[in-house]
Structure formats: C-alpha cells, structure tokens
Image (cartoon, grey):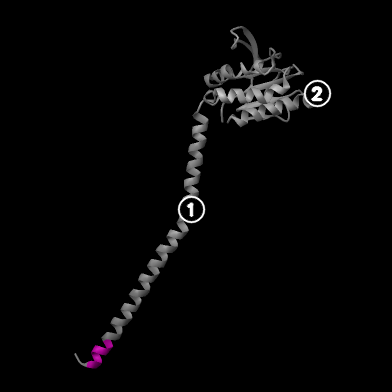
Amino acid sequence: MDAETATYWLGWVKFGQLVAFFLVAIGVAAEFAGEWASRPLEKIIDDARELEMEHLKRVTTPRVNLLTPEALTSIIEKIKPFHGTKFDIGHAQTGHEQWDFLWQLEPIFPKAGWEFVNWVGPQTFNKSNWTMQPHVYGIAKVANVVIELDPEKRAELLPAATALAEALNDVGLTARVANHPIGGTSTTSDAIHILVGIKE
C-alpha cells in the first residue's frame, strides 16, 4: 500500500473515530439526561404510592384503635366547656366497625357533662349502649363522622359542635360539622346530631 492510499484510509479511520466519539458522547449525554428527567417522575410515582398506602392503612384501621386513653381524655377536656349539651346519635344498623367505635366513644360524653337523648324521627332502631340500657338511635347514611344541627338552633349549638369536630380530628378521626342537615332525620331541635358512617 502506498503512502497516498494509506493517507486516504487513515482519513476514513479518523473520521470513524470521530463519529464513534460523538455517538458515545451523545449516549452518555442521553443517559445523564434520562436519569435527570426520570428522577422527578419516579419521586412523583413513589409519593403517590406512599399516599395510597397511607390512605389504605387509615381506611382499614378501625377507628376504635385511635381511641386510646390519652385520646379519650383529650376529647373530654375539649368538649367539657360545653357541659349540658344534648346530643343524639345516628348510624347504620350494619357495620361492626361503627358499633365498636361508638361503644368506646359514647361513654366520654357524660364524663364531659353532655346529655344523651333518644333519637326522635321516622328512621330509628333500639339498642343497648354502654349503659346496658335500651336507647333509641337514628339510621344515618353518611361517611366518617358528620355533626348536624337544626337550622333554628345552629347559632346556639355551633360552638359545641365545632369543639367536638375539632377534638375528634385532633386525635386522627375524620369529623366535620355539616352546613345543612343532610344525613339524619332527627327532629330534636335542641340537640347536636352525631352521625357515624363508614370510614373513608
């Protein structure tokens, strides 16, 4: 092979090396860019999975587990300033989670000076509560804990209802005061209506 031919082929070899270098450089850059771009997306997916797991754990954990002695004491102390408040209770007739939850929750009210009254309305059922005496409850179809007030007594009862909702939320129980009666049919206007539904 003469010098001219060798020079010709050397040019092509050098060109090939240059192309290969650029391809490697592009590959490395693409790998780096892909890694850089994928990290935020992976974090979003991981965060979404973590939130889903937390939600699932919260939904599947019975509310009665949140009613520790400390939690019960906290609720009592926060609603005690409203002693003398009348309340009735509505909940579904099925669902052991709701029954177990109320079995532990109801006894705190008399300790705070609140007065249980029988539910008055068309949809009722009888059961023995923590006193082992028969009482009348309403049938309510709500989610979590909803506190309803008669519109005519709303201004008077709202501070006690708000204190109860906040006390429940502070210990990890989802509760809210409804703007308008939606889930119960109690006709006792001077009582707070505590409705307990499925946990969500």
Residue bearing the label numbered 2: 152
Q: Residue 173 in the image: x percent, y percent? A: 59, 29
Q: Residue 138 in the image: x percent, y percent? A: 65, 16
Residue bearing the label numbered 1: 41
Instruction: Give the overall secondary structure of the magenta segment.
Output: helix
Q: Residue 186 in the image: x percent, y percent? A: 71, 18
In the rendered image, the quadrant that contains the C terminus is top right
Res 113 → quadrant: top right
Work out how far the residue at label 2 is from the one at label 1, CA to CA, in angstroms.
Answer: 52 Å
Count residues near mark 1 (Cα–Cα under 10 Å), then give few for <14, some for 14-19, many for 20+: few
Secondary structure state at the residue bearing disc 2: helix
| Residue at 64% from the left image edge and 28% from the top image edge | 167
Q: Residue furthest left?
A: 1
| Residue at 41% from the left image edge and 67% from the top image edge | 29
Q: Which residues are magenta?
A: 3-8
**Left or right of 114, for residue 47:** left
